[in-house]
Image (spheres, grey):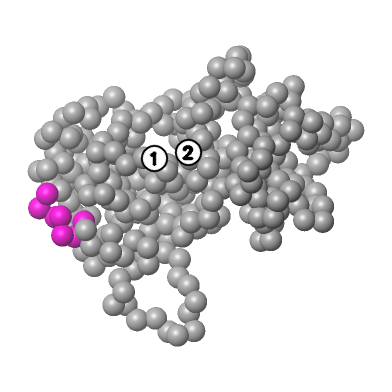
Amino acid sequence: MEESSVFLLCLTASSGVPLFCRSKGSSRQLTFSVIGSLNGVHMFANNQDVLLTSTCTENTRVVWKVFHESINLIVMSSESGASDLSLNRLLENVFNSMVLLIGLEDLVNIKNVERLKKDLRACYRLIDSFLYETEKMGDLTQQVDCVIVYDVPILQECLESFTQAAECDFGCLMAGGKVVVATEKWWRLSSQEVMLLCWLVASLAPHSSRDYPVYLPQGSPTVPHRLLTFQLVPGVDVCLLCGPKPSIQKVEAELIERFWKPVQDPIRSCLRVQLRSFPATVPLHHGILGVHCWRSSWSNTKY
């Protein structure tokens, strides 16, 4: 393998049929014989009642993980910092991304492989975002990347009023895929679900509004919800997780300007701190090399 390259393979666990292959840092694709060998050695070990989870060569680490006895994910990495922990976490994030966007039922009960291949294309942008390094750490910690701003009380009050008017309990304001403020019920979602929703919004192409069907990997893996997103300014989105109501047209036409136009300055301030995650005026000791702001969705302690 080329140095600092990663290959991610998804196959059916029973027959080994490739569903997709994604890569980072390499100009070439894996040959079918290599894919077959990686799957074959895992199937052989399984037939011998041996659980093969990982192995290493001189410059490559390989990890296998089977989900629900239906989907087999394999990752090969030649990155110097790759570990079994980080690669296993990557595979968990990839599978839950698949659940988030197409639902668990179609992954567990595969009836038409070609149709599943086509449906999985909707997951590529989100899956690829986990392959590339970013300033966010939620993919590894399974917690929620946050932004600390001075105007939290103002933005929190605005969000609460906005979600109440939309008759929705789950709302969130994001800057660069990081949470600025959220409703209490949004925080009651599992940490993994909140992390995935944030990464999904960050991975999508910028758009003024979206109505996106999503499944919650833990809370609702077989029944979809609607994720409504509205771009307040480039890089800052307000999101609602809801059922059949409200309509995206009603929210966009009646509520966005009413609730968010009066707080444009606090909204823009989120962009100024989102890379740093906290205001530049906050002093740090010279011995601190880095700070990661996050919140666990089950904790009552913010940031």
**Could you tell me residue 172's position as x and y percent?**
30, 47
Amino acid carrying label 2: it is: Arg
- Percent of width and height locating residue 210: 30, 33
Between residue 8 and residue 170, name the one nearer to us.
8
Residue 39, disc = none
Observer able to see residue 195: yes
Q: Residue furthest bottom?
A: 286
Is mark 1 in CB contact (under 8 Å) with mark 2? Answer: yes
For mark 2, does the 10 Å Cα neighbourhood hold few (<14), some (14 to 19), or many (20 or more) residues?
Answer: some
Q: Amino acid at mark 1?
A: Leu
Check disc 2 and report the residue beneath it.
125
- Indicate the secondary structure of the residue bearing disc 1: loop
Q: Earlier in the sequence, mark 1 or mark 2?
A: 2
Q: Which residues are magenta?
A: 261-267
Percent position (x, y) of residue 27?
Answer: 63, 43
Q: Is residue 62 magenta?
A: no
On screen, residue 261 above or below 9: below
Residue tagged by mark 1? Answer: 204
Instruction: Judge whether residue 264 is colored magenta.
Output: yes
Residue 182 horizontal side relative to residue 99, left or right: left
Q: Residue at x 22, y 41 (%)?
A: 163
Res 197 visible: no
Q: Dot 1, crowdedness within 10 Å: few (<14), some or many (≥20)? A: few
Residue at the image point whose x is 46% and y is 60% from the top: 135
Element carrying mark 2: helix
Q: Reply above or below: 265 against 239.
A: below
Q: Is residue 49 left or right of residue 297?
A: right
Image quadrant where residue 211 sits: top left
Q: Residue at x 63, y 27 (%)?
A: 19
